[in-house]
């Protein structure tokens, strides 16, 4: 007879359901139906939103069985490594988010898709809490998906500087990828968005369109100037960035990513 695994708290059940049922990159409705059946969990709330559907099924299973075995099976099936061969980043992100919650009952999901018992956490670290709070607020602002990879505890250990710094680096990495040009800093911006641009963010025909393009170029120069020494091409020394500062700068970086989503390469 299988060992009965300890029950999850309501908060953990809800947190896991929200990760797996995320509107943008969570399971689809048909996947939820299939995985619930595969895990032998009754689908009692199939007409509700995805995360609430998963939560209701989990809570009902746990109430009826007094254990979390089926729920752990569901998580394992949903995050089977073979499903993420072409999207390792998504697998790592979801597994880390799930493990932050599983830690409170002494379990963890390993890279091979199997569960193991670990030391039960009593508290969440300050850095982890910062990461959760920052990610939640940015989600409410509907920021660009590229920003979320920088909402990690290891980047928030001291203050918000490193998360913002890495997000800014990621923006310029993307410009290099789109333009196929390997310069850095202001040289990159001048080459890619100058009066003879490589990338354009609009039709670049009318005066107002060209003015908008120049304005976008200046935003990029401003972001570059905040974090890099234009002479040495080295990062500036870390300074304290508050949560509010981080939210506003990350929102600006998000705006730039959105404009790049629809840019055109013309030379």
Image: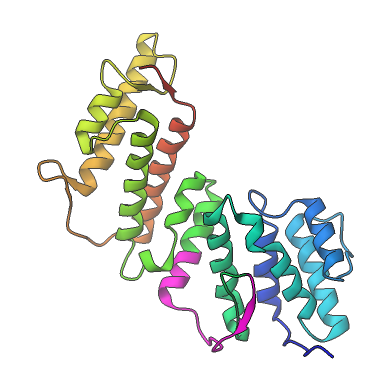
Give whichever of 36, 167 is nearer the camera.
Answer: 36
Residue 211 spot, x, y in % from top left:
33, 18
Instruction: Establish if 168 lies above or below 238.
Output: above
Q: Quadrant of residue 264?
A: top left
Residue at (36%, 64%) from the top-left corner? 155
Q: Quadrant of residue 105?
A: bottom right
Residue plotted at (79% across, 85% down): 67
Where residue 29 appears, as percent x and y from the top left, is 79, 52
Indicate left or right for 103 with 201 as reference.
right
What's the magenta region? 113-132
Residue appearing at x 68%, y 61% in the figure? 20
Q: Residue furthest left?
A: 231
Position of residue 162 in the picture relative to residue 41 (left or right)? left
Which colour assignment does the render follow?
rainbow
Q: Position of residue 76 (x, y in %)?
A: 70, 69
**Measured from the top left, where is residue 185 in percent x and y?**
22, 38
Q: Is residue 87 above or below residue 152?
A: above
């Amino acid at each position: 007879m299988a060992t009965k695994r300890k029950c999850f708290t309501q908060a953990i059940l809800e947190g896991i359901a929200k990760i797996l049922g995320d509107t943008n990159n969570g399971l689809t409705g048909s996947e939820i139906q299939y995985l619930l059946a595969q895990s032998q969990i009754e689908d009692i709330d199939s007409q509700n939103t995805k995360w609430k559907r998963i939560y209701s099924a989990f809570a009902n299973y746990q109430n009826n069985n007094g254990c979390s075995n089926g729920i752990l099976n569901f998580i394992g099936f949903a995050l089977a490594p073979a499903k993420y061969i072409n999207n390792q980043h998504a697998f790592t992100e979801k597994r880390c988010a799930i493990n932050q919650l599983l830690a409170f009952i002494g379990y963890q999901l390993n890279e091979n898709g199997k569960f193991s018992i670990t030391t039960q956490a009593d508290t969440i670290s300050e850095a982890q809490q910062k990461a959760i709070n920052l990610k939640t607020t940015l989600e409410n602002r509907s920021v660009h998906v590229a920003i979320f990879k920088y909402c990690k505890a290891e980047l928030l250990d001291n203050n918000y500087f490193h998360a913002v710094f890495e997000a800014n680096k990621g923006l310029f990495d993307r410009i290099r990828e789109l333009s196929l040009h390997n310069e850095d800093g202001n040289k990159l911006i001048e080459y890619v968005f100058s009066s003879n641009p490589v990338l354009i963010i609009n039709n670049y025909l009318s005066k107002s369109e060209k003015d908008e393009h120049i304005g976008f170029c200046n935003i990029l120069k401003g972001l570059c100037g905040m974090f890099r020494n234009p002479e040495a091409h080295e990062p500036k020394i870390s300074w304290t960035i508050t949560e509010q500062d981080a939210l506003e700068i990350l929102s600006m970086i998000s705006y730039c990513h959105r404009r790049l989503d629809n840019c055109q390469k013309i030379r």
